Image (cartoon, helix red, strand yellow):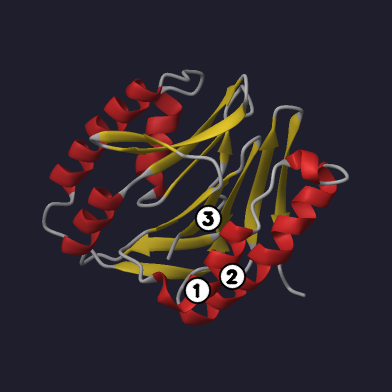
Amino acid sequence: MTFIIAIQAKDSIVVVSDTSSFYITDDGRIKPHPHKRLPKLTLDSHQNVRTANGISQLSDMVFDTIASNQELHELRRQLAKVSDVYLAHFKNSPALVEQIQLTTIYCSLLLDTGPRLYSIHTDSIERFEDNSISILSAKHTDPTNILLELQQLQKSIKPVKEFVDELSCISHYLRLIKPIFKKTHTLGDSSMDFHVYFGASTGYYFEHIPNTY
């Protein structure tokens, strides 16, 4: 199960994704790959971050098509176009059809006020508001089991200027995010380790977190 957390602060963003990998069986079912890890965060030439749930080949095809294009409407059009191709190809597999239809892209753009996150689906583009948090999965997810942790995370969103430095800000979020990924790992197929992207107007941080302690 893909699991992604996206956080929009007033002057910065945090995007975190697990590394779990899946494969498609001959009869069209989706199975977790026990030994393969898959990075799901992509940086473009402007150091903006992109990630998506759903089939990785689908989102990769969209990203490759417009690798240097920051036009959100073109990103949406390409997602709709590629999704139609995949839906036609996998129309006899209900599990894959559901995953394709749920595919959503999170991406960031660097504005004058700092990085801003956007959520892109085949028929819509939504701008993240300040102090907001959102999660993505490869299937419909009931967040009840991690609701308290997500609420605490949202209450703890702060601008970078309230920290001593950016490293302190990153550490603040990691302290709250690590337990969430450990918990989702015990509840499903998502990995305990994850990649984290932190972006601010002054630069960005991108790292793999083993999350073993």
Mark 2: give few (<14), some (14-19) or many (20+) Cα within 10 Å: many
Mark before the other along the chain sequence, 2 or 1 = 1
Say which residue label 3 marks: 5
Residue in the image at 35% along x and 67% along y: 141
Q: Which residue is identified by label 2?
A: 180
Position of 101 relative to 44 (above/below)? below
Instruction: Mark 2 and mark 3 in contact? Answer it, CB < 8 Å.
Output: yes
Q: Secondary structure at mark 3?
A: strand
Amino acid of disc 1: Ile
Decide which of tag 1 and tag 3 comes sooner along the chain: 3
**Rendered location of residue 122, percent (x, y):** 25, 37
Circle 2/circle 1 CB separation < 8 Å: yes
- Alpha carbon of mark 2 to alpha carbon of mark 1: how far? 7 Å
Q: Is residue 175 above or below residue 51?
A: below
> Residue 161: image x %, image y %?
78, 39
Residue kind at label 2, given as amino acid type: Ile
User: If you read the primary sequence from the N terminus, does the residue marked by circle 2 or circle 3 appear first?
Assistant: 3
Query: Is disc 1 placed on a helix, strand or loop?
Result: helix
Q: Position of residue 109 (x, y in %)?
A: 54, 27
Q: Estimate the spatial distance between the alpha carbons at disc 1 and disc 3, rounded to whole Å.
A: 12 Å
Q: Which mark is residue 157?
A: none
Where in the figure is residue 42, as x and y percent of width and height? 56, 38
Q: Is 110 or 105 nearer to us in this picture?
A: 110
Please identify the quadrant where the N terminus is shown.
bottom left
SS of the residue under disc 2: helix
Q: Nearer the viewer, residue 2 or 31?
A: 2
> Which residue is found at the position 76% from the left and 50% from the top?
170
- Give how far apart the Cα atoms at labels 2 and 3 are: 10 Å
**In the rendered structure, which amino acid carries the disc numbered 3?**
Ile
Q: Which mark is residue 146?
A: 1
Few, some or many residues within 10 Å of mark 3 (<14, 14–19, 20+): many
